[in-house]
Amino acid sequence: MFYREAGQYKSTYAADMAVFPLRQDRIGIAVILAIAFIGIPMIGNDFFIATVMIPFLVFSLAAIGLNILTGYTGLISLGTAAFMGVGAYACYKLTTFFPGVNIIVLILISGLFSAAIGVLFGLPSLRIKGFYLAVATLAAQFFLQWAFVRVPWLFNYNASGAIEVPLRSLFGIPITGASASAETRYFVCLGLVVVLTWFASNLVHGRLGRSWMAVRDMDIAAELMGIKLLNAKLLAFAVSSFYAGVAGAMMIFLWYGGGEAADVFNIRLSFNILFMVIIGGLGSLIGSFFGAAFIASLPTILKFGLPALGVPLSGAAAEHVTFMLVGALIIIFLIVEPHGLARLWQITKQKLRTWPFPY
Amino acid sequence: MKQTGLMKGAALGALLAAGAAIAPVAAQDSVYFANNAYRTGPFSGSGIPIGDGMRDYIAMINERDGGVNGVKVIYEECETGYDTKKSIECYEQAKSKNTIVYSPWSTGATLAAIPRAHIDKIPILSMAYGLSASAEGSTFPWVFIPPFTYWDGASVMVKHMANELGGMDKLKGKKLGLIHLDAPFGKEPIPVLENLAKKYGFELKLYPVAAADMQNQGSLWLSIRRDRPDYLYNQGWGAMNPTAVKEAIKNGFPINKLVGVWWAGGDDDARAGGAEAKGYKSLNFNAAGTNFPVIQDIIKHVVDKGKSLAPKEKVGENLYNRGVYNSMLVVEAIRNAQKLTGKKVVNAEDMRRGLEGLNITEARLKEIGMEGFGTPSTISCSDHSGHSKMYVAEWDGTKWTKGSDWIEPLKDEVRPLIEAAAKDYAEKNAGWPKRTESCEKSS
């Protein structure tokens, strides 16, 4: 009744090709942004922002990165965590060398380092596909994680091999380091994620995105149509790793605040992000957010939320219950909708359009 | 937490059907103590006995004495699975619930918490683990690492080697191998061992074990066989320790020359080697067994009443007793904080003072039923560790026994390193807060 396009006429090509052709969708996005920028900082306490929202944003960005590669271009990668690590270590080195440069700029630049490494490890993708490529990207995961432990230059010869996040501020407000408040860090994360999501949305809806999808659907046909596979695939690796790198730098600098970095970027993280992409929805940006919320935030919310709501659970019991609930939910969602939460969302919207008189 | 924060939290919690941790309305005569535990995951074998020991001592104090001077200690575990991400969540929860002290129980969690704790003003008690440099109290006023650091442990390992060989001068030309987890925790002893190796002329060989290869040390032991070190020091944790013991036996390395750090001294670690593990050694600062009034009280007031999570036969195991020791430090610090401030219900800032003035002497240990149970521990304003003595425990095939006298660490070697490392840490963490807290005299 409220959600339909009746009466909304498009008189220009631009309006017809808009990402959100429906006025209701545009209002929806505005509401979501308003909640994210105003609502959550206003009503969320530090605990909620620091342990639910910031991780959610970091994982969303990483999932968008992997979605560009796996969802849009059809190249499976198991090296996402390692590329995130490249971003984190690059940011650490950069801020050591250029302490005067703003940390947000450095976080973005560290994505470029990750992109370069991503292209390097993406080279085999020209020859191998599918599971074999996944195994090839495992090499990136193992090699890079090995380097994070073994190359002391990367962590400035710290005796415990840890990254220490220094205080960096913007307009006099600390944004990294221990004195940065959870809200500030949240706003920086949110700003980066919104801008980069907007950028990714333009990429995947543009010529580049179409060429990626063509490669995904059938690379020989794409090649015959004049798409250069080399460029398309390597660009996908570069863009994907860029996003992962930025997410990794955000993870250490805005969320963890330093510590044992090498162990953070382990293969489990790679798998987790792959699961986010699969459960959220392959080839969907909104799916990346759903996936991150489901895999990263839901366990935290259950673990701390259930006891807070009065369910008598604590310690290990809360952890076990969380494992079981999340596991069951994954199975349920995959049975109900194998194409991911994004598809479920699409179906809901479709149903809403015909509500209350479905045909 | 401020009242507004609480309301906000509650509102959002309801909104998202959970999410926000809501601080319990604290009763007037209780303090809240959050402890990180890991009863799940690959390290749970060590985490369970420690958690049980910690839980049971607090429960015993609450049952027997009605709390610390009448103030009940509300003990809550937060499950980390030894995962840094979850530990950070647990830190945030502990903070929002106004814990009086944060007990990270992993080096990674300690490293992540140290910068925050100095801003949030929550004392960290990392008992014989964590960042060795944090023993420098003037740089790290909020971190406490009693009774000693990994660096003290490494120096005692060298002293133990010298004792067996017959003097420090006999160390020349010997080979010491360090098997270590390839993570911050495992790398901690390296700088001290390198210094001592230079000073006393022995050779240090490093055998790093990647976290993923904890149970797969075959190739590493091939290099050990090739290098033939005279002694091996094992800075390991979790599944890595029983594997090292088994591999040592398999490769014919004399088991009595293999010495583990105190975290490699679990009963199950040694048991894995079977009968041949007899003679395996581990540094230690608490005694195993139940022949102590304090353990008897725990059995009487907690275990026999069915209030413990531990099966009765596990009570008194080495790691269980270490958990008891850790809780004892917390309880004694609360007592001290009460004495210093004159308040009954202490908060985190009082607790910092209580920890800084902590002085657990042999006499005090006897009073609380722990004579011979653990090492004494004295903390001061600049020395947040105490560099207490430890001993070398020996596995007799069924249980841990005292294999040596108490050994003092080489404090003169360790202390300058700690000061240098603390200075370096403060420099690298630009904007590190200067200590403003006034010094507490040892009581």
Image: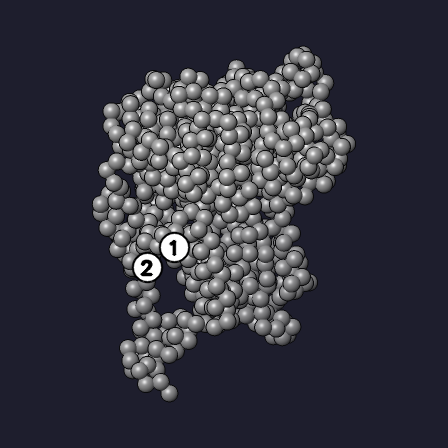
Of residue A316 and residue A296, the one placed in the foreground of this image is A316
Identified by mark 1, the residue type is: Ile
- Contact (CB < 8 A) between labels 2 and 1? yes
Which residue was labeled with disc 2? B16
Q: Is residue B107 visible?
A: no
Of residue B384 and residue A353, the one placed in the foreground of this image is B384
**Label 2 vs label 1: CA separation?**
9 Å
Return the chain for callout 1.
A
Would you place residue B118 above or below residue A24 in this image? above
The location of residue A324, given as percent across then percent down, is 48, 59
Of residue A144 and residue B174, the one placed in the foreground of this image is B174
Residues indicated by labels 2 and 1 sit on the same polypeptide chain? no
The residue at the point 68 percent across, 13 percent down is B166
Which residue was labeled with disc 1? A301
**Element carrying mark 1:** helix
Would you place residue B333 above or below residue B53 in this image? above
Residue B34, quarter of the rendered image: top left
Return the chain for callout 2.
B
Identified by mark 2, the residue type is: Leu
